[in-house]
Every structure is written in C-alpha cells, then in structure tokens.
C-alpha cells in the first residue's frame, strides 16, 4: 500500500429516516476526486487539514470552520491541500429537499442556490457535524431539525434564486443534443467524430460547445453519467458487476476505479451503506 494510503478511511451512507440525504464522512490523503457533478447539493465542512476544491471559477482552499457549498450540476474536483490530507463531513441532500426548506423557511421561491462556494461559518460547520452525529445515533428528529436550521442559515446569508439556463446558441443546442445521445447510447457511445457528423457539426466545434455548456468534455461527462446510473442500479440491488456491464464499463474493476474517484468509496461499500440503517457501535470508518 502506498505511503499515506493506510491512513485513509471513508463511509458513504444513507440514514433510512431521511431518504433524500446521503452522508459522507472521510479522511483522504492521496485520494483525488475527478471532475464530476451531483444532481443535488453538496454541503461539506473540514474538521482537520485542507481540501482543495476545483470549481469553474477557480480552486477553493477549505480548512476547519469553512463550509463548502456546491449547487446541482456544477462540475468540480477535490484533492488534499496539505500533505496530511483532510478530514471532513459532507451532506448530499436532494434538490427537492433544499427547495422545500427554502419555500418553508425563507422568502426565496424557485430553484435556489449559492453564489459563493466556500464561506467561513464555524456555526454552520458545527451544524453539519451535529447532523452526522444525530443520524449516527438514530435521532431522526434532531437530524431533520438541524438540517433545516443549517440550510435556512446558509440560504439566508448566501443564497438566492438560480437563473434558468436555456440553450439559445447553435453550439449550446448541439451540446444538449449530444448529451441526449450519450445518455441514450451510454453502453456503446459513438466516437466524437461520428457524433459530430450525426449532429451536423464538426468534432472541434462540438467539443468546444460541450465543454462550455457542461464544464467538461464529452468523454469526462460520460464517465460521470455512467457512475450516476450505476449508483441508481446499485440502489436498486443490482450487483456491481452487472451494473458495470449495463452502463458500458469494460468490467467491474473499471467501474470500481471510476466510481471510487467520483463517489469516494468503492461500489460495494456504497451499496452496503445505502442498504442498511446505521446502528450505533456496529459500523466504523474503513
């Protein structure tokens, strides 16, 4: 095992009482997250070390007391910002959860989001760790209440309504059409040249338009989309090897590698964490 790798641990799971909220608690040293997106929101706080989060506007260096907030479908990467890595607790609530809280507890209406990606807010940071603790102790009332308080606080201080994005240019429309083709033919996608010919454009123009529209080139987006679909299949009880074949990975190790780089844990650990309710004292980070 490489130096430092033995110091890493991660637990990605779902608390049964809050089914639209995923939780990740981890320490990473050498691990890096490749560029990816989430359908829902990300709220994370670092308890030790520094995490470097690569976002479209630049790299955020997040340390203790900071809260990282990432809107849905925003491409990002993550890696250690210091040699000792980082320890953090992260919440992944669905878009529906956040927008419901916004409608119930704020004056914001529509799809809400955050203009800032990292803010110094020790109180909100503590709330994130307390939500984790409440979920781990099986205290659904506390976990749900604290989540609402945390989201309302961050929306009140840093939130707003996200603008609706409509592809007006020909390049944006080609990018959207290309994404649809890749979604429909995920297991056997066309080459960039074939895809461009089908859409009546050039490979270079399509590559440039796609990256501008989605923050990553088509092949990177496709890997992210495959992992997303594999996650849904794992949630439904599909075996990792079968999920790998269904979404177009060559084999299970291929899925394992990309899944871990995007989700933070291997497919098997992810599936186990999503399949059972946490029982205090029976599960520890691995």
Image: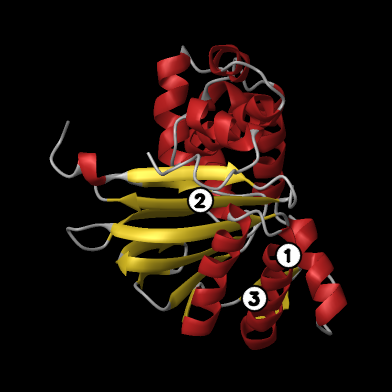
Between 222 and 154, which is closer to the camera in this rendering? 154
For disc 1, the marked residue is 144
Comparing labels 2 and 1, the label whose residue is closer to the camera: 1
Asked if residue 109 shows in the view, the reply is: no
Helix, strand or loop at disc 2?
strand
Outermost residue, left side = 3
Q: Residue at x 47, y 62 (%)?
A: 56
Q: Is residue 256 left or right of residue 143?
A: left
Q: Is residue 196 left or right of residue 145?
A: left
Q: Is residue 212 above or below residue 163?
A: above
Among numbered discs 1 and 3, the one appearing first in the sequence = 1
For disc 2, the marked residue is 24
Q: Is residue 279 above or below residue 43?
A: above
Q: Quadrant of residue 234?
A: top right
Q: Position of residue 231 (x, y in %)?
A: 62, 32
Question: CB of mark 2 within 8 Å of CB of mark 3?
Answer: no
Q: CA distance from mark 1 to mark 3?
A: 10 Å
For disc 3, the marked residue is 150
Asked if residue 145 shows in the view, the reply is: yes
Comparing labels 1 and 3, the label whose residue is closer to the camera: 1
Q: Is residue 100 above or below residue 153?
A: above
Q: Quadrant of residue 233?
A: top right
């Amino acid at each position: 095992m490489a130096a430092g790798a033995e110091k890493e641990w991660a637990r990605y799971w779902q608390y049964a009482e809050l089914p639209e909220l995923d939780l990740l608690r981890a320490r990473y040293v050498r691990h890096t997250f490749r560029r990816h997106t989430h359908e829902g929101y990300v709220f994370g706080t670092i308890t030790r070390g520094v995490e470097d989060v690569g976002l479209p506007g630049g790299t955020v260096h997040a340390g203790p007391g900071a809260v990282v907030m990432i809107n849905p479908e925003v491409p990002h990467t993550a890696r250690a910002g210091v040699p000792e890595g980082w320890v953090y607790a992260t919440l992944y609530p669905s878009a529906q959860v956040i927008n419901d809280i916004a409608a119930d507890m704020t004056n914001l209406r529509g799809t809400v989001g955050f203009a800032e990606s990292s803010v110094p807010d020790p109180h909100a940071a503590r709330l994130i760790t307390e939500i984790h603790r409440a979920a781990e102790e099986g205290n659904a009332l506390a976990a749900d209440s604290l989540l609402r308080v945390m989201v309302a606080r961050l929306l009140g201080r840093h939130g707003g309504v996200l603008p609706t994005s409509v592809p007006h240019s020909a390049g944006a429309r080609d990018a959207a059409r290309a994404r649809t083709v890749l979604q429909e033919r995920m297991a056997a996608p066309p080459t960039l040249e074939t895809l461009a010919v089908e859409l009546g454009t050039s490979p270079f123009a399509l590559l440039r338009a796609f990256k501008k529209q989605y923050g990553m080139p088509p092949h990177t987006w496709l890997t992210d989309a495959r992992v997303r679909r594999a996650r849904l299949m794992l949630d439904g009880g599909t075996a990792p090897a079968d999920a790998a074949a269904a979404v177009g990975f060559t084999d299970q190790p291929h899925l394992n590698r990309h899944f871990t780089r995007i989700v933070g844990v291997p497919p098997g650990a992810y599936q186990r964490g999503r399949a059972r309710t946490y029982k205090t004292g029976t599960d520890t980070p691995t």
